[in-house]
Image (cartoon, coloured by chain):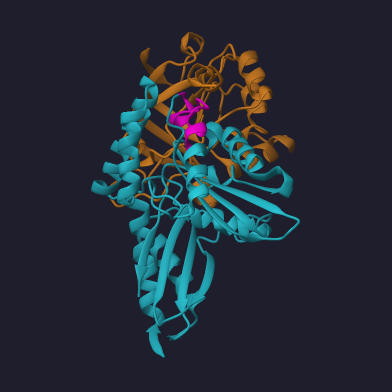
Chain colours: A orange, B cyan
Amino acid sequence: MDKRINMPLSKEDALSLNCGDYVYLTGTIYTARDAAHKRMYEALRKGEALPVDIKGQTIYYMGPSPAREGRPIGSAGPTTASRMDKYAPELLDLGLIGMIGKGKRTQEVKDAMIRNGAVYFAAVGGAGALLSKCIISSEVVAYDDLGTEAIRKLEVKDFPVIVVIDHTGRDLYIESQKQYREE
Amino acid sequence: MREIESKIITDTIAEMCIEANHYLTPDMEKALDDAVSNEISPLGKQVLCQLKENLSIAGSDTIPICQDTGMAVVFAEIGQDVHITGGTLTDAINEGVHKGYTEGFLRKSVVGDPLERVNTGDNTPAVIHYDIVPGDGLKLTLAPKGFGSENMSRIFMLKPAEGIEGVKNAVLTAVNDAGPNACPPMVVGVGIGGTFEKAAILSKKALLRPAGEHSDISYVRELEEELLERINKTGIGPGGLGGRVTAMAVNVLTYPTHIAGLPVAINICCHVNRHSVRNL
């Protein structure tokens, strides 16, 4: 079912989304990928605050190509989420409510999603030019020195994603592959 | 002895970096069209249509097809009667990568040390494979490789007794493990034989063969066709969201090997199977 959702994602919206829903997101999301996650993890180990308050926010696993003049961002598709699996459960327990990426997640991540009522969306991998058209603005808000891996605040409009894992832990990758597998 | 000026090589590589990251070769465009026709899953078809639209936007608006503009892999076939002037061939290629990735607004995705992980800032160095060939030409092939799919690539050192069934199992294992992570529909490069590193290089070279073309060796052609059919029965589908089009091509290259071994490397590429070729 196609749905339109405002970001940041409300708790009610997160609980209303089901595995397989096609969703258009509009509003604020943040980007972070490998290096930013590692740095956030190290900050937490030292008892420091995270550079952005992630409570109720959604992280898009993405590192863009540079923007040409007059454009908010370059190519901007999802990166593989499993590399963030080591860090995601702790962030979910701190209030992160949504993740956007592509590819499989571990059971530990799913358990943390169920525990916290969170959602994992997939954007289409390798559609970075198309997805960049749904990003209205982009601002580096932390870890500027990481270049493409810095944390960015994005304003998106009708950004197309699919609910792959919902708050009950249902996984579209597993269900849909079974549906189309031929023996 | 023919002379080629290193600056020409640098400028050519720079152009190729930009071209490969914005336009796919016609065989890949056709493979994507065929995928749309063959896909039965509605969501799968929708993903494929997004990929086609993405390609069209990349070309018309000069936005890289994928934000992962890859690590630059270069195959250089250099005629033994060629002399490079004004610098080394390796420096010329790396300067071309620097220029292409900087001037072309391409992402810099290379870290200078695999464990210290500080970005080099210009996507250098490239990974360069040299071949000395007869003649006085220089053929350059640039294939930027994204790591979503590279990370799902595998190598198996099989026993000779495992034979062709062992090879098939190895390929299917790699594809099944890759699943949605490798941005399907994929192109699967397979290298069989040689040594550990030779098999891996063959599997990368296999990705350069146009989708839809097959090996000249009849049993290898049959293997390619069977593997494609079986991969497309896994149900992984476009984006890993279920469907019949999981791979668009399986390309196999073989090489003589040792009496004790059967190396099999599987280099998985996403649907953005990029390359650009120039003859200087």
Q: How many marks?
A: 0
Residue lying at 41% horizontally and 34% vertically, measured from the top left: A154
- Can you give x and y, in whole percent of width and height, for residue B172 in the image? 59, 36
Which residue occupies the foreground of this view, A175 or A45? A175
- Can you give x and y, in whole percent of width and height, for residue B238 in the image? 43, 30
Whether residue B250 sits left or right of residue B47 in the image: it is right
- Can you give x and y, in whole percent of width and height, for residue B222 in the image? 49, 43
> Is residue B63 visible from the viewing direction of this image?
no
Check the image and report above or below for B88 versus B12. Answer: below
From the image, which quarter does the C terminus of chain B lie in? Answer: bottom left
Residue stretch in magenta: B228-242
From the image, which quarter does the N terminus of chain B lie in? Answer: bottom left
Which residue occupies the foreground of this view, B54 or A58? B54
Check the image and report above or below for B83 versus A149. Answer: below
Residue lying at 56% horizontally and 27% vertically, measured from the top left: A54
Residue lying at 71% horizontally and 43% vertically, measured from the top left: B162
Which residue occupies the foreground of this view, B108 or A150? B108
